[in-house]
Amino acid sequence: METFGRGCLYLIVGFIILTLFAILTRSYINIPWFILIPIIILAFWIASNKSKK
């Protein structure tokens, strides 16, 4: 459960950073699914490694 919570936290923080970047640059960010899914997997993998230490 700790890994899931930490992974969600990483995804939420990343989403907030991307949103702020889009607002500041007044642009539209389009992330394709074939890039988004590995990013989600990577976030949970990093969270899993952090909880093992």
Image (cartoon, rainbow, N blue to C red):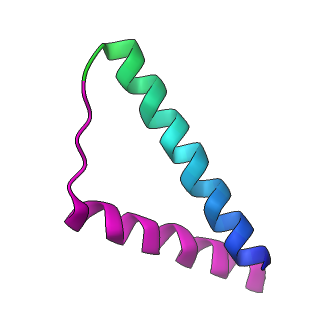
Q: Position of residue 39 (x, y in %)?
A: 39, 64
As rendered, which of 53 and 8 lies closer to the eye?
Answer: 8
Q: Residue at 62% of width from left, 66% of height from top? A: 7
Q: Residue at 32% of width from left, 15% of height from top? A: 25
Range of the magenta residues? 28-53
Is the stretch drawn in magenta largely helix, strand or loop? helix
Residue 49 falls within the magenta-colored stretch: yes
Q: Residue at 71% of width from left, 76% of height from top? A: 3
Position of the C terminus, as image quadrant, is bottom right
Q: State the image quarter where residue 41 is shown.
A: bottom left
Q: Residue at 20% of width from left, 55% of height from top? A: 32
> Which residue ends up furthest to the bottom in the rendered image?
52
Q: Position of residue 10 (x, y in %)?
A: 60, 56
Q: How many marks?
A: 0
Q: Position of residue 1 (x, y in %)?
A: 78, 80
Is 36 left or right of 20, judged from the image as shown?
left
Q: Position of residue 40 (x, y in %)?
A: 44, 67
Is 51 left or right of 23, judged from the image as shown?
right
Is 10 left or right of 21, judged from the image as shown?
right
Q: Is residue 29 above or below residue 36?
A: above
Is 30 left or right of 44, judged from the image as shown?
left
